[in-house]
Image (cartoon, grey):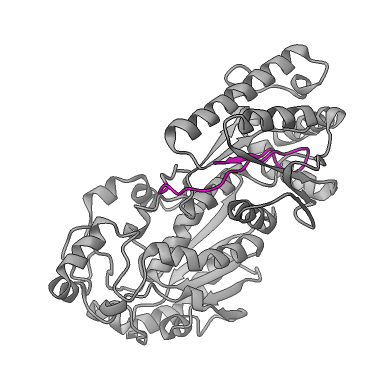
Amino acid sequence: MVPGIVSYLLLVRYLKWLSVNAKSFNVGSYRRADTPQPTADFFDTGNAEGERLRRAAAEAAVHDMLHWFEHEGGHVGILDATNSTRSRRAWIEERCKSKGYDVMFVESKCDDEELIMNNILEVKTTSPDYIGQDPEVAARDFRDRIRNYEKVYETIDEPHLTYVKLINVSSQVIINQVSNYLQTRIIYFAMNLHITPRSIWLSRHGESEFNVLGKLGGDANLSPRGMAYAEALPGLVKGSVGNKDITLWTSTMKRTIQTVKHLNYPKKQWKALDELDAGVCDGLTYEEIEKKYPEDFRARDDDKYNYRYQAGESYRDVVIRLEPIIMEMERGSDIMVVTHQAILRCIYAYFMNVPQDQSPWMEIPLHTVIKLTPRAYGTQEERFKANIPAVSTFRAKYTSANMGGETAIVDAERVKSPIARAQANGVTTINGDVEAAPQKVEAISVAESLGLNDDTVVVE
C-alpha cells in the first residue's frame, strides 16, 4: 500500500475550474519547515520526536484551514495528510464539526505492486522530500516509509463517517454516508483519475473564411490557407506523437472536420466541443458588435468570463458543458482535440491552472499544435507551429479589433502576466493559484488512510 493517487493539486485545480473556492493545506509542507528531507526513520512509530513534529505540523495545518474557512471565505479545504488511524480521523472530525463544517474522508488504497512502483517513481521521488536525491534511493526510502505507515494503518470503516474508499485506482469504489452535491463531484473526479502517463494535443481548426473576414461564430469552410494547414497537419502531428495510438476529437462544425481530414486516427465528434455560442452577435465582426451593441461590447470586456451573449453563452457556460469532456480526458489515454478558440481556452486553463479572469484573454493562435503532458506537480507544455500564415483572431481588452489583420494586437497587461510569459517560452510548467468566484456550498473533509494519496478535504 502506498500514499499518492488522489492528488490534492489536481482536485484543487478541478474545483477552482468549477468556480469553487478551494485550497489545500499540505501537512508535509508544514513539517518540512523543521525537517525538510527526513528519512523513513522519521516516520517510525517508535520515533517520539518524529511523532511530536508530525503532530505539530498537522495541528498547524488544521488551524490554518479553519482560519481560512472563517476569515477568508473558503469553501473546500483539503487537508493533505496521511490520516491512517481511527484516532487521527476522530480528532479531525471533532475539530471540524466543532466549527460547523462537514467532513468527508477519502481513502485511496493500493496493493498492486506495479501501480505502487509507478506511483512512487512518478510522484514521490519528485516530491520536495526527495529533491536532488537519486530516484532509486528515494524509491527505496519511500518504501521503508510505507512499511512504517503499515504498522499503525487502520482502514476507514467507521459507520458514522462520510467517506469514499478507492481501491487500486478506482477498480473498486466504496461510498458511505455521502449526502450532498459537492461530495458527489469530488467522488466523481477521484473515480476518473488514473496514473498512466499520457499527453494531450490541442489545435484550433485551420484558418476559416470567417476568420479572414473577422467574423465571429458561424459554420464556415476553411480558407485556402486553412486547407494548407489541414494538409500539413499529419506531418506536424507525427513529429510530436510518433508511433503512439491516439484518439482524435473534433467539434461538429465543418471547419474542425475539414482540418482533420488527412489525419488517420480514430475520430469522434462532440457537440460539447462546438464553439462558444455568440447568440445575436453570431456572424458579426467586433466592429459591428461595438456599433450595434455598445453596452454589451463594453460589458463583455468588463467581465468576459461571466458575460453571456444575448441568446448565447458565456465562458462560464462553456466550462459547465465541457466538464464531461474533461472527465473523459482525465480517464483516457493519448488524445488530440481539434476545436475552437474559446473551447481551447477553457481546456488549456484547466490543465495549466489559469485563473478564470485571465483565461478568456489568452491568445490561442491558429496553425499551432499545443502538446500538454500532465505530471504530478504541474503540466508540461510544448508548441509546434506550422509554417503557414494565418490571420490573428485575438482582440485585446478594451480595444476595437481588426481581426482580419496579419498582426496580433498586444495587450500590455497580458504580456506582463505569467501565463503570457509562459506561452512565449515554448515549454513551461505552470502552477498558479486561482482566485475563484465565491459560491455557497455544503462542506467536506477528506482523509486518506494508506492508499495512493494523502488527502483530506473539508468543504464548508
Q: Measured from the top left, where is residue 36 in percent x and y?
A: 61, 22
Extreme-left residue of the structure = 291
Q: Measured from the top left, where is residue 188 in percent x and y?
A: 65, 58
For the N terminus, give its image quadrant: top right
**Residue 187 relative to residue 230: left or right:** right
Q: Nearer the viewer, residue 216 or 115?
A: 216
Count of numbered tags? 0
Q: Is residue 76 above or below residue 387?
A: above
Q: Measured from the top left, where is residue 73 in percent x and y?
A: 44, 38
Magenta stretch: includes residue 255:
no
For the C terminus, give its image quadrant: top right
- Residue 133 in view of the camera: no
In terms of image quadrants, where is residue 293? Answer: bottom left
Q: Nearer the viewer, residue 176 or 153?
A: 176
**Residue 446 relative to residue 342: left or right:** right
In terms of image quadrants, where is residue 2? Answer: top right
Q: Nearer the viewer, residue 202 or 308?
A: 308
Q: Is residue 426 above or below residue 78?
A: below
Magenta stretch: includes residue 446:
yes
Q: Residue at x 73, y 30 (%)?
A: 90
- Residue 169 in view of the camera: yes
Q: Residue at x 64, y 18 (%)?
A: 56
Q: Measured from the top left, where is residue 185 in percent x and y?
A: 60, 56
Q: Main secondary structure of the magenta part?
A: loop
Task: Give the residues drawn in magenta, as a range.
Answer: 436-460
Q: Is residue 312 above or below residue 7?
A: below
Q: Is residue 261 above or below residue 7?
A: below
